[in-house]
Amino acid sequence: MSYQPPTLHRKSSAPWDRLRPVKQDPLESVGFVSKGDNRLLNLKTQESYYHKITARYMQFCAQNSKNLNEAFSSLSINDSTSSSECSRNSAGSSARLSSDVRPTTPAYTARGLSASKFAPVQSVVAIVNPSEELSMILTALRKLREGILATSSSASSPVFSQRVHVFNIRLAILALHPESYHASLRYLLTALHSHKYPLSSTELREMLVYLILDTALRQDDLAEAYKIRSAAKMSSGFHDTQVDLILRAVVTADWPLFWRIRSKVDGYVRAIMHWKIDSLRRSVLKAIGKSYLKCDIDWIIKNATGNELDWDELVQKEDIGWQRDGHVAIIRKPKLKS
C-alpha cells in the first residue's frame, strides 16, 4: 500500500489575489507639479483640491475649538518631515489670539467637494497632532499655488487664484509661518490685483494692512513700511488708524499703547504683532532695570507682557535674576556709603 501525502487545504484565495486598500490622505496623495505630478495642471482638479483643503481646515478648527490658539501656534522649529514637505518656523512663544475671533475662510460648495478625481481608497479622517495637520494643510496650499502659477496663462481670469492666495495668507499668518504668506502676499498685491481684476476694497485694505505691519514688525524695516503705506495711500486712498497707532507705538517705544492696541485688534493683526513682542519685552525690562531699584511686579507684568504672562513665566523666559519680595521685585540694592 503506497503512502499518500495529506492534502493541503486553504479556505480562500482572496487574500492572496488582491492587495489590501492603502490608507492615503487626500491632501498628501497629490504631489508638486515641479516634481512631476501633473494632476494640478487641470483647472477643475485645482478647484476640487482647493475645496478639500478648505474642508480640512474647517475640520481642523472644529477639532481644536477648545484650544485653537495653541493649535495655530503649534508649528515647531523642526525641518520638514517625511510626511510633510512644508518647512516650519519657530514661533518663539505661542501667539495668543483673541478668543472671540475666529479665522474666516472662503465659501465652498458641496458640489466641489464631490468632484475629486483623486479620491483615495480609504481617506484619513483625522490627525491627532495639530502641528502635523496644520503643516499638511500649508503644504497642500503650496502645491495648489504652484499648480495655479503653472497654468496662469491658460486661466480665463485670476479670480480663483486670488481666492486661494487670500485664504493661504490668512491661514499662514495665524500659523506664524511667514514662508507661506510673505511671498504670496507680495504676489497677490503686485500681480493678481489689477485694474481689470481688482480685489474688493475690503480685501485690498486687509492685505495692505498685513504687508505694512509684517514689514515693520517682523522684518523690522520701518522705512519700507512707511514707504508702502504712503504708496498705498496715493494709489488707493489707504488709511487705517490701527496701523498708524501700531507704527507710532513701535517708533516711540510706547509699550502701553502697543499692548492696548493688541488687546483690541482681530486675530490676524494680533498674530503679526506677535513678531515684535520679544524685542519689545526686552527693551521694557532693560528700561526698568536701569531706572528702578525695586518695582511693583504687577506693573512690570502689565508693561512688559501686556498681562499675557505671569511672573514665573516671565522670569523663566527672560532669565530674570531679580529677587521677589511679596509683590515687589528687588532689582538691585543701593550701594552703601563708606
Image: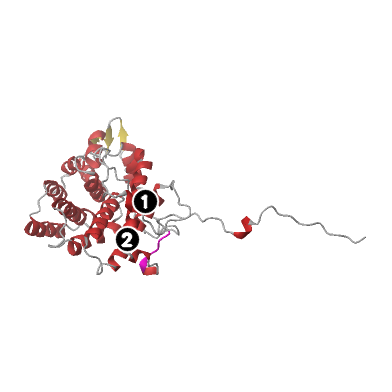
Amino acid type of the residue tagged 2 in the rendering: Lys
Q: Are marks 1 and 2 in contact (CB under 8 Å)?
A: no
Mark yes or no: residue 287 visible. yes
Q: How is the image coloured?
A: secondary structure
Secondary structure of the residue carrying tag 1 is helix
Magenta span main SS = loop
Which residue matches tag 2? 44
- Where is residue 276 shown, x and y percent of the image? 23, 50
Secondary structure of the residue carrying tag 2 is helix
Left or right: residue 198 compared with residue 28: left
Q: Which mark is residue 83?
A: none
- Where is residue 286 shown, x and y percent of the image? 23, 46
The range drawn in magenta is: 29-33
What residue is at 93 percent from the left and 60 percent from the top?
Answer: 1
Which class describes the residues within 10 Å of circle 1: few (<14), some (14-19), or many (20+)? Answer: many
Q: CA distance from mark 1 to mark 2?
A: 24 Å
Instruction: Name the image quarter holding residue 98.
Output: top left
Q: Is residue 202 depicted above or below 64 in this figure?
A: below
Looking at the image, which is closer to me, 307 or 194? Answer: 194
Looking at the image, which is closer to me, 37 or 130? Answer: 37
- Where is residue 311 shown, x and y percent of the image? 31, 37
Looking at the image, which is closer to me, 103 or 156? Answer: 156
The numbered mark, 1 or 2, whose residue comes first in the sequence reads 2
Instruction: Name the image quarter holding residue 300.
Output: top left
Looking at the rendered image, the quarter that the C terminus falls into is top left
Which residue matches tag 1? 134
Query: How many marks on residues?
Result: 2
Amino acid type of the residue tagged 1 in the rendering: Leu
Instruction: Name the image quarter holding residue 143.
Output: bottom left
Which class describes the residues within 10 Å of circle 2: few (<14), some (14-19), or many (20+)? Answer: some
